[in-house]
Amino acid sequence: MSITVNPLNSSFFAEIGGVDLGHGVDPATLGEIEAALARYAVVVFHDQKLSDDEQIAFSQQLGRLSYALNPGREKGQTARLRHELYDISNLNEKHDVLADDDRRRMYRLGDRLWHTDRSFVAAPTTYSLLSAREVPPIGGNTDFADMRAAYDVLPEAMKSRIDGLVAEHSVWYSRGLAGFSNFREDEIAAMPPATQPLIRVHPRSGRKSLVLASHASHIVGWPVEEGRALLRELTEFATEPQFVHSHVWRAADLVIWDNRCTMHRGTDYDDVTYRRDLRRTTVEDAAA
């Protein structure tokens, strides 16, 4: 089987066809998909009506999966999805739309800030795979930013300034930025902060990229406000229109992106009226 690869953005977003992921892929096809990801960093497959089992099985072909805590639930509330799936939805455990004051809704508002999945976790995170089961009629897109392209055109003085710097990343910092601060001690303990370098070299492509995101709370060893000013400056630069592609979801889309060289964010939609059910698997590590 040979896939087709159609660039939708000249630098980093492509559409892949000619494959049914629900039946798994052979090693040669998997290699073609991984090569496309190394080149483009974000790819979309249309018309992939995946079950949870099928999404998990294909994701495991790319590497070992991380398990979702799906925080924001009240103590004793049942998770809507099994632990391999991150719940990127506005639905509760009965599959009804969340109330506007539900803790889960408030927590997930942080997904509308620029971020990189699990940058607040020390373990390496490679690919995220997001399957659209139900989408709203308007809004709820996902914007992606190419952190390689942004790094490439940084002034040399800035590249020198940030070389070797490390930032602390915390999911609770980003949730606070989004207006949710009702954290429990057990939630904080389950997801402590981690550090990440400001510049990362991709192991497969060899390209350098910026490591930012709303989870990045401060520069280690710098005065907090000075570090945050630098992080804001870099994030504003890296999310200028020339580095960004917005994906308009169709039901049965599967989008895969490489967290090592991208940021993303969900865009606004009427989440107390329209249903949006997206399910993410995340690869904790991979060979390259």
Image (cartoon, rainbow, N blue to C red):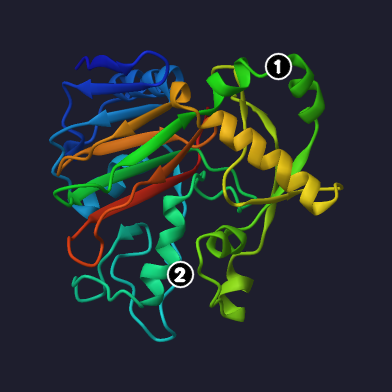
> Going 13% across and 43% down the picture, which residue do you hit?
49
Residue 235 in the image, given as x and y percentages of width and height: 59, 37
Rendered image quadrant of residue 283: top left
Q: What residue is drawn where x is 75% and y is 15%? A: 156
Residue lying at 42% horizontally and 44% vertically, measured from the top left: 265
Label 2 or label 1, whichever lies nearer to me, is: 1
Per the model, the C-alpha gap separating discs 2 and 1 is 39 Å
Label 2 amino acid?
Pro
Residue 107 seen in render: yes
State the residue position of label 2: 71
Q: Is residue 146 above or below residue 133?
A: above
> Disc 1 designates what residue?
155
Name the side, left or right, on which 133 lies relative to 200: left
Q: Nearer the viewer, residue 256 or 251?
A: 251
Q: Is residue 204 visible?
A: no
Q: Quick one: 257 or 229, which is closer to the camera? A: 229
The three-letter amino acid code for the residue at tag 1 is Pro
